[in-house]
Image: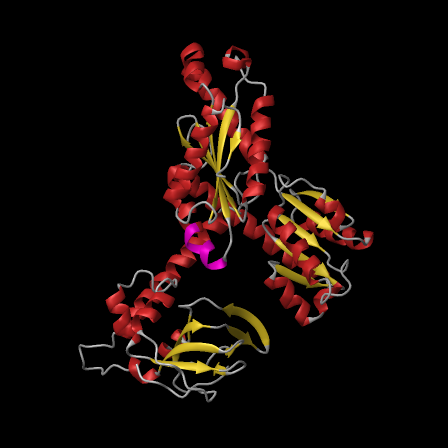
């Protein structure tokens, strides 16, 4: 690589290829590229230093674009003056689609801090139509596209766990301080979605009292409780997050939706629809109709997929679904710096139960335990039969303290349950032992995470069973 006078006027130091390879080799697009091949790719570029607030790519520009690999610093993706996304990890790539598309750029890419990048001019990607050879950079393109496909698939698998999971009744929640507006939303739902059961809340505080296990297929909420979005943005975001935990589809019905900046903020925080008050009846009816159609489409998808992904005895997820879900979390969550936890549980003295009461009664116990698990979980959590009398619970966006609370809640529920012949078990009751492990605190891949949870379960058995154990 050559030294380069950066576009902001500073000279970048010549970097060693091994050092650069170490810095960006762990990035999502480079993990599967052999290091010698990565070095060959990097040799095609130029190392540059760029000052803060420099526009690398300009929205609407149709001239040939450069591609950049981020080495140090942070860049922002901005559309129409509005922040969309931040890239701050070594190995993040910008401009790759602009190189292969002739359309004008769809966003600005602006440095938020002084940045060090590797720049690749567009002419490196030009290929003679009659030539059988192409730039080595197309190897990088292949890895970028393959990684984006894996990420999209993984995100789809994670979202799938938030869909309707059973063909039972549909539930709609309405959160609004104004009784007349609650009535408007209620009558609209009754007209468009007559089979739905409706629960109303006069404030976020009332809604927060609703147990996590109570799940809604649509939530229609006002956010005018928060007068100042700038100062109350954290409260608004927390309110949206609480609704997303309990709702598959969140619709904001509020005077706040009259302002474009607030609509954008709400959508970014997870709202699927925004409807401004006051509105024509058709606007609200149309939004509710879309949510209902989405509900039934997802219900049909679940029915079609359930046979291949469900344990026949318990009705929980099977090993195939479990492994796909965990692979998706491990792919997506490290880049987003988000934790998730595993709870592995094993029925205590289950062989003793089967030997004394038969496998048919043992199956009934497993089915009863399988019905208990989802009641303590949130939408998006996954309960699976791991094998025999073992079950595994996966808790996305869950740190260790919360996972321990969930495990203890499950332990107490099993201990208190009325199960056939439980009094004949050693200790006079049928219980379970739990092992808990959290990503990335306890392990950074699924195999190691399973091992940690299993070792904790094993320790729990030696501590006398009917306990919850996590790594120290």
Q: Main secondary structure of the magenta part?
A: helix
Nearer the observer, 455 or 428: 455
Q: Which residues are magenta?
A: 330-336
In this picture, is 7 found above or below 26? below
Which residue: 30% across, 69% down? 18
Question: Which residue is located at x 26 percent, y 63 percent?
Answer: 34
Q: Is residue 303 visible?
A: yes
Side of 379 relative to 187 (left or right): left
The answer, for residue 187, to whether it is visible in the render is: no
Residue 73 position, x and y percent, is: 48, 73
Residue 333 part of the magenta-drawn span:
yes
Viewer-proximal residue among 457 and 253: 457
Q: Position of residue 256 (x, y in %)?
A: 73, 65
In the displayed orientation, state which residue is furthest to the right.
179
Number of residue marks: 0
Image position, residue 82 (x, y; %) = 59, 74
Q: Position of residue 209 (x, y in %)?
A: 72, 42
Residue in the foreground of this view, choosing between 7 and 321: 7
At 65% from the left and 47% from the top, the residue drawn is 193
Tell me the quarter of the image containing the N terminus: bottom left
Scheme of image coloration: secondary structure
* 180 lies above or below 436: below
- Residue 48: say if magenta: no
């Amino acid at each position: 690589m050559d030294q380069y006078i950066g576009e902001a006027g500073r000279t970048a130091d010549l970097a060693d290829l091994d050092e650069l390879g170490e810095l960006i080799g762990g990035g999502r697009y480079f993990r599967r590229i052999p290091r010698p091949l990565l070095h060959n790719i990097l040799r095609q570029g130029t190392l540059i230093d760029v000052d803060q607030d420099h526009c690398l790519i300009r929205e609407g520009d149709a001239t040939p674009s450069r591609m950049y690999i981020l080495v140090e610093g942070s860049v922002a993706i901005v559309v129409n003056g509005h922040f969309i996304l931040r890239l701050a990890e070594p190995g993040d790539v910008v401009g790759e689609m602009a190189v292969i598309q002739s359309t004008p750029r769809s966003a600005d890419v602006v440095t938020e801090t002084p940045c060090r990048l590797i720049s690749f001019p567009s002419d490196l990607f030009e290929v003679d139509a009659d030539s059988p050879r192409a730039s080595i950079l197309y190897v990088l393109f292949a890895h970028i596209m393959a990684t984006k496909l894996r990420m999209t698939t993984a995100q789809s698998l994670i979202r799938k766990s938030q869909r309707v999971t059973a063909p039972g009744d549909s539930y709609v929640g309405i959160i609004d301080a104004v009784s007349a507006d609650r009535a408007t939303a209620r009558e609209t739902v009754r007209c468009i979605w007559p089979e739905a059961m409706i629960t109303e809340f006069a404030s976020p505080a009332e809604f927060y009292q609703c147990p996590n296990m109570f799940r809604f297929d649509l939530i229609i909420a006002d956010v005018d409780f928060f007068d100042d979005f700038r100062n109350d943005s954290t409260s608004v975001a927390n309110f949206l997050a609480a609704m997303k935990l309990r709702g598959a589809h969140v619709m904001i019905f509020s005077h706040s939706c009259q302002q474009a900046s607030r609509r954008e903020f709400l959508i970014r925080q997870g709202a699927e629809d925004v409807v401004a008050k006051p509105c024509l009846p058709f606007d609200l009816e149309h939004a509710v109709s879309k949510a209902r159609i989405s509900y039934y489409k997802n219900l049909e998808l679940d029915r079609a997929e359930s046979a291949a992904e469900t344990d026949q005895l318990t009705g929980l997820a099977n090993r195939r679904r479990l492994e796909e879900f965990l692979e998706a979390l491990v792919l997506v969550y490290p880049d987003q710096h988000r934790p998730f936890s595993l709870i592995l549980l094993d029925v205590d003295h289950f062989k003793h139960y089967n030997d004394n009461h038969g496998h048919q009664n043992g199956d009934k116990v497993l089915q009863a335990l399988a019905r208990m698990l989802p009641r303590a979980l949130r939408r998006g959590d996954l309960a699976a039969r791991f094998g025999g009398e073992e079950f595994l619970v996966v808790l996305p966006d869950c740190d260790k303290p919360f996972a321990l609370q969930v495990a203890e809640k499950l332990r107490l529920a099993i201990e208190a349950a009325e199960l056939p012949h439980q009094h004949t078990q050693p200790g006079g009751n049928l219980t379970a032992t739990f092992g808990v492990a959290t990503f990335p605190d306890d392990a950074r891949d699924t195999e190691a995470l399973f091992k940690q949870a299993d070792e904790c379960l094993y320790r729990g058995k030696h501590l006398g069973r009917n306990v919850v154990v996590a790594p120290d």
